Amino acid sequence: MDTRRTLFLNAPSYEGFDGGAGARYQARREVTSYWYPTWLAQPAALVPGSRLIDAPPHHMTWDETLAIARDYELVVLHTSTPGFGNDIRFVEALRAQQPDVLVGLCGAHAAVNPEPCLEASEALDFVCNKEFDYTLAEVAAGRPLAQVDGLSYRHEGRIIHNRPRAEIEDMDALPSVLDVYHRDLTIENYYIGYLQHPYVSFYTGRGCRSRCTFCLWPQTIGGHNYRVQSAERVAAEVARVKQLWPKVKEVMFDDDTFTDDRERVADVSQRLGKIGLSWAVNARANVPYETLKVMAENGCRLLLVGFESGNQQILNNIRKGIRLDRAREFVAHAKTLGMAIHGTFILGLPGETPETIQQTVRFAREMDLESLQVSMAAPYPGTELYEQALEEGWFDGEPVINGAGIQIPALRYPGLSADDLNRAQERFYRGYYAHPRVLWRLIKPMFSDYDLARRRLREGREFLGFFRTKADTTGAVEG
């Protein structure tokens, strides 16, 4: 059988929603932010003649996307817990216009909820479990669904679960996603406030050795075995980025924790130093000075670090595996080496109180990071936090975003209401970015970079408007 004409799709959703196909933060953000759809691009690279549509950053409408989908025999959507309802509506519209199309879902939500996903709509034919690259390549090649590992599918009114697919061990065997990016995406449409623009991001490995109870990807798709591309392959990919997009200013390696394998970090760093392109990574707040030094000397500009909380007991509760004193030392080393840090914090984790929130705010101010993100604890299906929250009565399965696609407090604790958390998030953000030192650090580069100045002004307007929109759509009171 010939390869099915295949469309890989991140469907139109909430305005400004970056909640699928590679985004870790499954909600509308405070400023325009779009991650590359790496998880969809990888199977697309395996399927000859396929196409990838990432609708949100390309501002493609529902009708435009449906019109394009009409030409395909197989359509695969990447879905997420917040975007699932919208994706099912799209699947049903697709089925209405093309009764014979084969339609499937992939992504973390589908991986842990195969039966509920299929039960949600008869318009859906199959869902993928865990890593789905080769699973989708086999479906596209025309292999009968019953013979495809890692698949749950509908057959004669019954839902059938095939045996699990083995974890991918040889990451170098996967084809590059860069050709798919070059063919199907407009890279200028991808923005992340703390990354230089334009940027390109992709994975050099999958899996994370850490056991954080809230973290979605290692518990649902990637696992805890960190499997990586060779250092030679990584360097070749970065060189190719420079060749395909001469205007690209930075590469982001989106591995869950790039710094997990320190010997490899040193090898990759030394190879990247010869290419001369700025790069950034996800890191834990425990990387030793010697490793940071070799990274900084070879072009690593920024570290994206999940600090989560300034309270040690909360970090212990979520099995973060980081001590606050070690995190302070890590930040001091990075600053000594001239490395920027974007820190992420989470409000509402188990053990949170008004007092622990204040400790986190003080800790963030003490660290004086380049930039930060403040999220709400989100209990996603498939995570230990989700099961714990249900068992403890902190969560009753409510949505983690509101009707505008904005993240809302999902966990409830005595003495800490949703309004308390919403107000704390806004005060955290406003207090941090209103500090003269932080403000000047953001403004100073604008005087010598017109594009950056224009972008920062847009982000400032969006940031201020975000909280007005959140208050209007959640009933939260500013204060």
Image: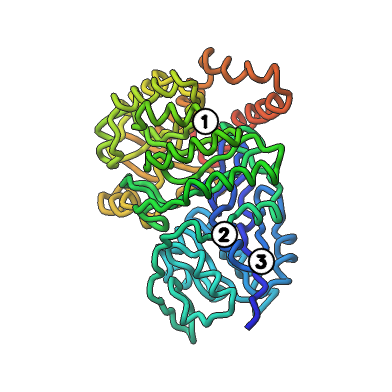
Q: Which of marks 2 and 3 is in front?
A: 2
Percent position of residue 68, x then y: 73, 65
Q: Inspect the image, locate mark 1, and give the three-letter code of the amino acid beneath it.
A: Asn
Question: Which amino acid lies under the numbered mark 2 shown in the image of this protein?
Answer: Pro
The residue depicted at 53 percent of the width and 66 percent of the height is 105
Instruction: Give the secondary structure at mark 3.
Output: loop
- State the SS at label 1: loop
Residue 202 visible in the snapshot? yes
Residue under pointer 1: 298
The disc placed on residue 175 is 2
Q: Which of marks 2 and 3 is nearer the N terminus?
A: 3
Gap in angstroms between the C-alphas marked 2 and 3? 14 Å
State which tag comes first along the sequence, 3 or 1. Answer: 3
The reply to whether callout 2 and callout 3 are in contact (CB within 8 Å) is: no
Residue 468 visible: no
Is 139 located above or below residue 262 in the figure?
below
Q: Which residue is drawn at 42% across and 71% down?
A: 115
Q: Residue 50 carries which label?
A: 3
Q: How far apart are marks 3 and 1 (CA)?
A: 36 Å
Three-letter amino acid code at disc 3? Ser
Q: Circle 2 — which element?
A: loop
Identify the residue at image location x=63%, y=52%.
Answer: 178
Q: Do the residues labelled 2 and 1 touch (CB within 8 Å)?
A: no
| Eye-nearest disc, 3 or 1 | 1
